[in-house]
């Protein structure tokens, strides 16, 4: 049986970029800075084609696309969010909603992951929270829905 995959997409570094030991050490510090369980994360693992949460085995695969591609010139929140925000999206967004009715990759699932991570992840900067909220809003737009802002989202966008 193949693993269910939940992932962040965007114009980031290639998922086929092998993370170096120094990049992995930096990412481990990011994971600890958001109070996530380091044992849930595996690096450069080929069970997923990109950074993803695998529901059925409760593992987050971290691949090269966890890193933003600063050379792309994109202003899209999914492209510019920090690696720490991506890790929060997977851990506090997807993992928190493990075994729910939404299918992995469903835009509503992606919206919920970014929105949830923005609000509950400890240790994120205001800018990282803002990028996650903007990503959530983009997910709604991709669904053809005008995003409605709740009080938390409004506060983060206007800080």
Image: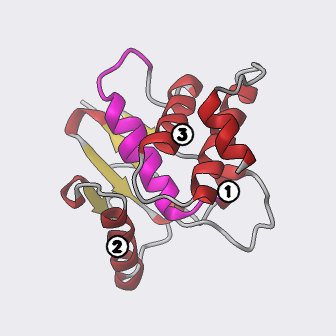
Instruction: Using the numbered discs, state the Cα–Cα distance from disc 3 to disc 1 in whole angstroms.
Output: 13 Å
Q: Which quarter shows the N terminus?
A: top left
Instruction: Using the numbered discs, state the Cα–Cα distance from disc 2 to disc 1 in whole angstroms.
Output: 21 Å
| Residue situated furthest top in the rendering | 101
Magenta includes 83? yes
Q: How many marks?
A: 3
> Dividing the picture into quarters, in which one does residue 102 lie?
top left
Q: Nearer the viewer, mark 2 or mark 1?
A: 2
Q: Earlier in the sequence, mark 3 or mark 2?
A: 2
- Residue 29, labelled with which disc? 2
Q: Is residue 67 above or below residue 133?
A: below
According to the picture, the residue beneath numbered tag 3 turns out to be 114
Mark 3 neighbour class, 10 Å CA radius: few under 14, some 14 to 19, many 20 or more: many
Q: Nearer the viewer, mark 3 or mark 1?
A: 3
Q: Look at the image and give the residue range highlighted in magenta.
A: 81-102
Q: Secondary structure at mark 3?
A: helix
Q: Secondary structure at mark 2?
A: helix
Dominant secondary structure of the residues highlighted in magenta in the image:
helix
Instruction: Tell me the residue at 33%/79% (across/down).
Output: 25
- Residue 19, labelled with which disc? none
| Residue situated furthest bottom in the rendering | 22
Q: Earlier in the sequence, mark 2 or mark 1?
A: 2
According to the picture, the residue beneath numbered tag 1 turns out to be 79
Q: Is residue 138 above or below residue 39?
A: above
Residue 15 shows up from this direction: no
Q: Is 148 left or right of 40, judged from the image as shown? A: right
Magenta includes 52? no
Q: Nearer the viewer, residue 2 or 117?
A: 117
Q: Is 20 left or right of 65, judged from the image as shown? A: left
Q: Earlier in the sequence, mark 3 or mark 1?
A: 1
Instruction: Tell me the residue at 61%/66% (across/down).
Output: 68
Q: Position of residue 13 (x, y in %)?
A: 59, 66
């Amino acid at each position: 049986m193949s693993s269910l995959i939940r992932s962040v997409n965007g114009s980031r570094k290639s998922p086929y970029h092998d993370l170096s030991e120094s990049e992995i050490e930096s990412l481990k510090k990011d994971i600890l800075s958001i109070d996530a369980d380091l044992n849930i994360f595996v690096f450069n693992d080929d069970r997923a084609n990109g950074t993803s949460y695998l529901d059925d085995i409760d593992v987050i695969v971290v691949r090269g696309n966890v890193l933003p591609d600063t050379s792309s010139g994109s202003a899209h929140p999914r492209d510019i969010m920090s690696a720490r925000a991506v890790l929060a999206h997977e851990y506090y967004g997807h993992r928190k909603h493990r075994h729910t009715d939404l299918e992995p990759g469903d835009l509503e699932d992606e919206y919920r992951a970014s929105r949830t991570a923005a609000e509950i992840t400890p240790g994120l900067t205001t800018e990282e929270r803002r990028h996650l909220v903007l990503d959530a809003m983009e997910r709604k737009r991709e669904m053809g829905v005008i995003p409605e802002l709740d009080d938390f989202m409004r506060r983060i966008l206007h800080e």
